[in-house]
Amino acid sequence: MAHELEHLGNRLRAARQDRGLTLQELAESSAMSVSTLSRLESGKRQASLELLVPLTRQLGIRIDDLIEPEVRDPRVRRPTTHRDGLEVTPLAPEGSAIHTFKITYSPTDTLPSLRVHDGYEWLYVLRGKLRLRLGEQDLILSRGEAAEFDTRVPHAMNAAGNSPVEILSIFNGDGERMHTHAAADLEPERR
């Protein structure tokens, strides 16, 4: 538990400063001495619930906000899915604010229908060639090229030529649903 409390004082000071409060203002509103608060913030006084509860109430935070969270396993372990010639590998945890995927498009003879939806997309070609139809533009992107576009412009993508294309793609939530068809619509890869 000592490790989790290691930065409590710094977090307490930051929360106070973020709210524009002086040591004296917070100490008075929490019914404690300025000296006690100063010693808590500097780590020279051990924190107790008796001291933290009034402080967190005045700051509008939870005690948990002051405690260092347990370091979670950073690896992303989500299944690769297949649908309509796409192989979609999630690269961000479920519920992440940024939706990142590695998408492989199998070669096809025809470009999929143009789509329009709210949001933005950023993509980077890892290997192969990508055909990107964006409004009236018909573009070929090669390995190492990137594109960013407003997804309210009609757009579609596929592999250009006879080889698959692999891209790194970042979407907002609307783009993720449209381009990957959400995990519920996709079949997990069989291992």
Image (cartoon, grey):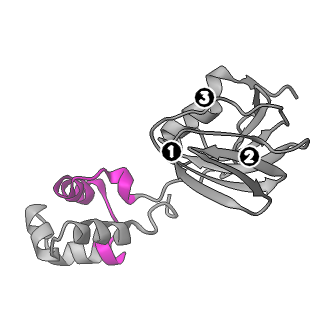
Q: Which residues are magenta?
A: 40-66
Give the alpha-carbon distance from disc 2 to disc 1, as whole Å.
21 Å
Lower sequence index among marks 2 and 3: 2
User: In front of the other: label 2 or label 3?
Assistant: 2
Q: Residues within 10 Å of mark 2 (few under 14, many from 20)?
A: some
Q: Residue at x 49, y 36 (%)?
A: 174
Give the alpha-carbon distance from disc 3 to disc 1, as whole Å.
13 Å
Q: Residues within 10 Å of mark 3 (few under 14, many from 20)?
A: few
- Residue type, numbered disc 1: Asn
Q: Residue at x 82, y 46 (%)?
A: 165
- Looking at the picture, tell me which residue is in the foreground, 160 or 49: 160
- Looking at the picture, tell me which residue is in the foreground, 191 or 52: 191
Quarter location, residue 191? top right
- Percent position of residue 127, x then y: 83, 54
Q: Residues within 10 Å of mark 1 (few under 14, many from 20)?
A: some
Q: Is residue 68 left or right of residue 47?
A: right
The numbered dot on residue 172 is 1
Q: Is residue 142 above or below residue 106?
A: below
Residue ranking furthest to the front: 136
- Residue type, numbered disc 2: Arg
Give the alpha-carbon distance from disc 2 to disc 3, as whole Å.
23 Å
Residue labelled with disc 3 = 182
Residue labelled with disc 2 = 131
Check if residue 44 falls in the magenta segment: yes
Check if residue 83 falls in the magenta segment: no
The kind of secondary structure element at disc 3 is helix
Quarter location, residue 110? top right
**Contact, CB < 8 Å: mark 3 with mark 1?**
no
Q: Is residue 33 left or right of residue 120?
A: left
- Residue type, numbered disc 3: Ala
